[in-house]
Amino acid sequence: MKLALVGVGDAGTRIVDRFVSREQATGRSITTGNILVFNTDDRVFEDTRTIPEERRVLLGDTHSAVKRRPDSADVSASAEGKGGDADRVHTGTHADTIDSYGVGGDPDVGATVAEADLPEIRRALDQIDETEVAATMLVAGLGGGTGSGVGSVLLEELNAIYETPVYVLGALPSTTEPDRRALTAARGIRTLVPLADATFLVDNEAWRHGTDSVAARHNNINEAIVTRLLALFGAGERDPEAISEMRVDSADLSRTLEVGGVATIGYATHELDRDDNDLFARLLQLLGLSNDTDDGGVDAATIKRLIRQALESKLTLPCAVTSADRVLLILSGPPDTISRKGFETGRYLLEEETTTVEVLAGDEPVSGATEITATVVLSNVTDIPRIDEIQRQAVSMHSLSTTDDHDTAGGSDSDLGDDEREDEVDPDRVLTDDTAGGEDDGDVDENDGSEVDNTNKHNAADSSVEAFDGETDHSFDFEAERDE
Ligand SMILES: Nc1nc2c(ncn2[C@@H]2O[C@H](COP(=O)(O)OP(=O)(O)OP(=O)(O)O)[C@@H](O)[C@H]2O)c(=O)[nH]1
Ligand SMILES: [Mg+2]
């Protein structure tokens, strides 16, 4: 599927950059240059390798709440004098702390800045040729003031101008980050998920290795994300000449995602050893001596095992697989290796394990590949422990903020008054049984059943700042969905 990528904030910028560099290195053609990144702090722009300057948009130039990073010469001078600023700059990228540059982690400032810069945003978006792509994906760290705040305005804008689906890829903060990141992510989930045609979430907590530095951790996670996105959106985009009866196409992916909500991806690889067993199996088959009546080179049991591994692999967002609405399986490998029988048993396995009959499956023939990969997409999953945890953290932070005027995150959000904090997360609307039942909550009713309501699409452009207000109709309640 041809896809435009719009990165926002540091995480979004890095992930888009990584995607394009892998796309180029593997000779694929997915974004075909339809990329853009937005940020309120340009530190990470300097580190990008594949994003042309005109596609990197720095917002908030004229906004007084946006703090510009001093250039490095100024920093060394001031660090000599004061000592502290140099550290700040070093933590400005890939840190578990929130620094004060850009919008300083505040999504309300992010949304305000983006609203003010809408003309500039629109001019930048003109560089994307919607006729060349089947969908657009907004990429952001949902705990970021820029990612969530600017991201919410961008998503509304993309919805308003594009007829094609707009997906979101959002990274969730890890537990080592300040509570304020979790609060922002909880709000980001509630704002973005109902507005997006589907939201892929990645849990940084599940994917981090204990001893890694934050930078190494992010790099590894970004690599894993990009591998999965390429397997998914790249399927059907290469080797058009290779023959396959079951070729996956972009309609399969859109159909899987059209139920909306949160999607997660599993992935597994099997290295081909074509010199021995597989060739032998093929030989037997050619001679009519194989009792595997299969048409492929890798036996059915191996294919089935691979599909099981993908389902049981660490999902981008761990969840109960039985809560999925739809499933898509993509098997990618040399055209002659993917066994039809293995494919069918694998599909049956997915139906059983996920307890859904809506399993689509297809293959992506790749001549000369040395491995077979299985990619499994689970869409509209609702049983997600990590989201419950983030919501609980957000609610307890909210409670603390209403009983204590001090900034419990130790961050720089002292500019938020109590009234504003009231709006950030309303615990009654996020976690209580009242909301879970959904009877008296118009918002939840709107999101009734398994489908996320997308009626806001194409008419929500005027409500981006209010989208963070607990009283708008953008809320998405996972508890309510689960109980239905
Ligand atoms: N997977 C991944 N997550 C990241 C990366 N960088 C940051 N994050 C996560 O994204 C969240 C937001 O961080 P940033 O992207 O730095 O924030 P921002 O969107 O630039 O917004 P500010 O708060 O204004 O700096 C953090 O809570 C991290 O969990 C990255 O490179 N990869
Ligand atoms: Mg930032």
Image (cartoon, rainbow, N blue to C red):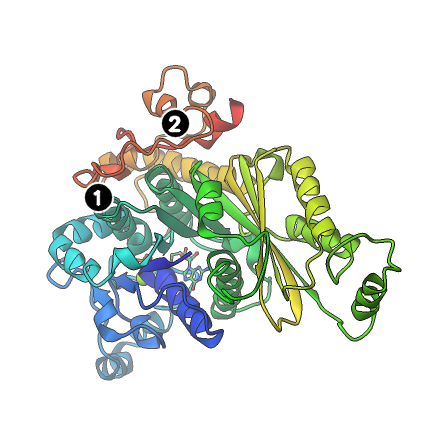
Q: Which residue is mark 1?
A: 160
User: Residue at 61% of width from left, 33% of height from top?
Assistant: 357
Residue positioned 76% across, 71% down in the render = 273
Q: CA distance from mark 2 to mark 1?
A: 20 Å
Q: Residue 72 or 418: which is nearer the viewer?
A: 72
Amino acid under disc 2: Asn
> Please, is residue 455 above or below residue 114 in the view?
above
Relative to 137, 353 lies left or right = right
Closest to the camera, between mark 2 and mark 1, is 1
Q: Give the mark nearest the N terminus, 2 or 1.
A: 1
Q: Dividing the picture into quarters, in which one does residue 449 lie?
A: top left
- The image position of residue 91, as x and y in percent, is 38, 69
Secondary-structure class at tag 2:
loop
Q: Can residue 119 be seen here?
A: yes
Instruction: Give the quarter of the figure containing the N terminus.
Output: bottom left
The foreground one among 60 and 130 is 130
Q: Is residue 384 visible?
A: no
Residue occupying the point 17% across, 60% down: 60
Residue at image mark 2: 447
SS category of the residue bearing label 1 = helix
Residues at badges 2 and 1 in contact (C-beta under 8 Å)?
A: no
Q: Position of residue 407 (x, y in %)?
A: 33, 47
Q: Position of residue 33 (x, y in %)?
A: 32, 68
Q: Image height check: is 9 above or below 88?
A: above
